[in-house]
Image: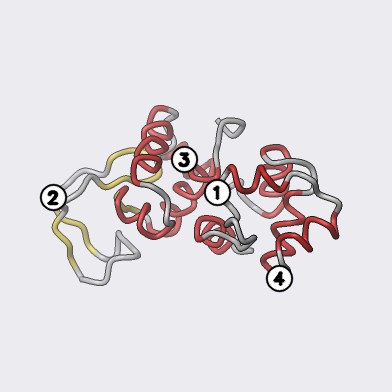
Amino acid sequence: MSNDLTPVHLYILLHLKRAKVDYAKMMAKMSHVDLDIVNSCIEDLTKAGLIERDSGSAIKRSKAKFKKAFEVRKHHTYYRLSRKGEQFVRKIDRRWLREYFDSTIGEGAFDVVTLMAEGKNFEEACKSVGFDGAEDFRLFKLVTPKGRMTRLLELILAFAGI
């Protein structure tokens, strides 16, 4: 499945690692990604056995880390990482992300991402590492037309600890 992961798949996995349980609409709202895309990715991840539906009618804040109330009644379908998903997400570190970005977007993509995380402009970051796949960043919705990191990329980096 790691070869088939889009940045949205990756975000959902990292989000669920951090939140423990959450629902599609909240993941879409936080990442500024279209709900239909999030739902499609959730379906892919469920089929791959990396996430699963969370049962029950209520959820406590100790289980849902992003909820503000002590206990919340479920009005959505909540998802959580499966055992297989937890094992997979444990492997995601800086080296894994380098391989992921470089194989998904192109050699040097991770260097561009880290330079952008340090505050460098997208165009400058691409030039400084000799990266010529700028359109792929836009295709995956990781960079805005003006060359800024999208909320999706910001959250991937934040949740991955970069």
Q: Measuring 49% from the left and 45% from the top, which residue is drawn there? A: 8
Q: Residues within 10 Å of mark 4 (few under 14, many from 20)?
A: few
Q: Nearer the viewer, mark 4 or mark 2?
A: 4
As helix, strand or loop, the secondary structure at mark 4 comes to: loop
Q: Is residue 147 above or below residue 41?
A: below
Q: Nearer the viewer, mark 2 or mark 1?
A: 1
If you read the primary sequence from the N terminus, does the residue marked by circle 1 or circle 3 appear first?
3
As helix, strand or loop, the secondary structure at mark 2 comes to: loop
User: Whole-Å distance between the Cαs marked 1 and 3?
Assistant: 24 Å
User: Whole-Å distance between the Cαs marked 2 and 3?
Assistant: 23 Å
Q: Measuring 69% from the left and 54% from the top, which residue is drawn there? A: 94
User: Whole-Å distance between the Cαs marked 2 and 1?
Assistant: 35 Å
Residue 141 is tagged as 1
Which residue in the structure is indicated by mark 2?
57
Residue type pointed to by label 3? Gly
If you read the primary sequence from the N terminus, does the residue marked by circle 3 or circle 4 appear first?
3
If you read the primary sequence from the N terminus, does the residue marked by circle 4 or circle 2 appear first?
2
Residue type pointed to by label 2? Ser
Q: Residues within 10 Å of mark 1 (few under 14, many from 20)?
A: some
Residue 109 is tagged as none
Which residue in the structure is indicated by mark 4?
118
As helix, strand or loop, the secondary structure at mark 3 comes to: helix
If you read the primary sequence from the N terminus, does the residue marked by circle 4 or circle 1 appear first?
4
User: Whole-Å distance between the Cαs marked 3 and 4?
Assistant: 30 Å
Which residue in the structure is indicated by mark 3?
85
